[in-house]
Image (cartoon, rainbow, N blue to C red):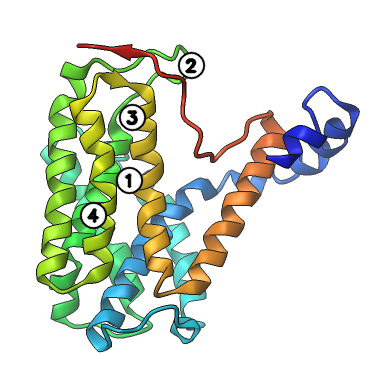
Amino acid sequence: MLAEKYFPVESSRYKRFVGPFQKLDSFFALSPDRWFSIWTVVLAGANTAAHLENRWVYWDWSTFSYLFIPILVFSIWLDRYFNKLQFFSNNIDSIQSALSVIFRGGIFFILGMLPIGFNYLTIIYGIPYIIFFLVGYMVWSIQIDLKEKNPPLKATILPFLIIITLLTILSSVIGYINDDPIISTIGAVYAPFPLVALIFPSAIRHIQRCRIYVIFVPAMFLSVRFPWFLIMVTLLFWILRYYNYFRFGEVKPSFKVDLPITKDS
């Protein structure tokens, strides 16, 4: 990031920006880093509804509706509300927590349908998207020690990685059967990341890539149909990077992964 070059953390230029960015703390207390995944699921619902109307809609700016603005804002509030309820878990460690995640994803998915249209076929065609949403939660449920740089034990994460890989492939296959090029491609493009983590020795960088691209891949492919969404996620990405840099001296979110420290088992 250019700010690292021209505004080093210890420089006076850097310190001049710390105060203004500190005033944004109340806004960032809303956890805008979560908005990537929330909005992606909402757009997945819109995409499914659009697909059923016209499969050949791509890079169409007219897909934007002013109804999306209150829906996306409401999805932020809803996510915060869900987080306050004990029923909804942010980590998957049981069948109950997986079902709560599926229900949660289904709500966001249905919200995205509203500006375009809702019917039972949208729910059926939405199944692979909800499966992939579950994959995302499972990936982020794998605990990694970023401070000590110790990779997780392979025996501990192996069951998760097997299920994640199988569900990713399943979402792609169902998408292909449904003749949905978006989710079938999302699943196919993402599948190598958990597969690498499954086959190769345990390493933090493998899990980091799984975490990064489980959000990035669907966001990019959904932007093929909803180009205005690309502007939204790009702006959010850079706002978060500059805030975290000038507030905490950290460049995140980032596509950078940690050095290859491995553990065989």
Q: Position of residue 200 (x, y in %)?
A: 23, 24
Nearer to us: label 2 or label 3: 3
Q: Give the amino acid at mark 2.
A: Lys
Mark 1 vs mark 3, foreground winner is: 3
Relative to 179, 60 lies left or right: right
| Residue 87 visible in the shown view | no
**Amino acid type of the residue that numbered disc 3 sits on in the rendered structure:** His
Query: Regarding mark 3 in the picture, which secondary structure is present there?
Result: helix
Q: Which residue is mark 4?
A: 187
Residue 176 shown left or right of residue 260 in the figure: left
Query: Which of these two is toward me, 225 or 14?
Result: 225
Instruction: Choose mark 2 or mark 4, whichever is in front.
Output: 4
Which marked residue is nearer to the observer: mark 2 or mark 1?
A: 2
**225 or 128: which is nearer to us?**
225
Question: How far across and down, in percent of the image, does residue 154 sit?
Answer: 20, 18
- Helix, strand or loop under label 1: loop
Q: Earlier in the sequence, mark 2 or mark 3?
A: 2
Q: CA distance from mark 1 to mark 4?
A: 30 Å
- What number is the disc on residue 147? 2
Badge 4 marks a residue whose secondary structure is helix
Q: How many C-alpha atoms fall within 10 Å of the one at disc 3: few (<14), some, or many (≥20)? A: many
Calculate the distance from the C-alpha at mark 2 to the C-alpha at mark 1: 29 Å
The residue identified by callout 3 is 206
| Nearer to us in this view, 177 or 128 | 177
- On screen, residue 243 versus residue 132, left or right, reads right
Does dot 2 land on a helix, a strand or a loop? loop
Quadrant assignment, res 109:
bottom left
Q: Position of residue 263 (x, y in %)?
A: 28, 11
Image quadrant in which you'd find residue 78: bottom left
Vertical placement of 125 versus 202: above or below? below
> Which residue, given by chain and number where applicable, does mark 1 sit on?
85
> What residue appears at the point 51 percent right and 65 percent down from the top-left corner?
230
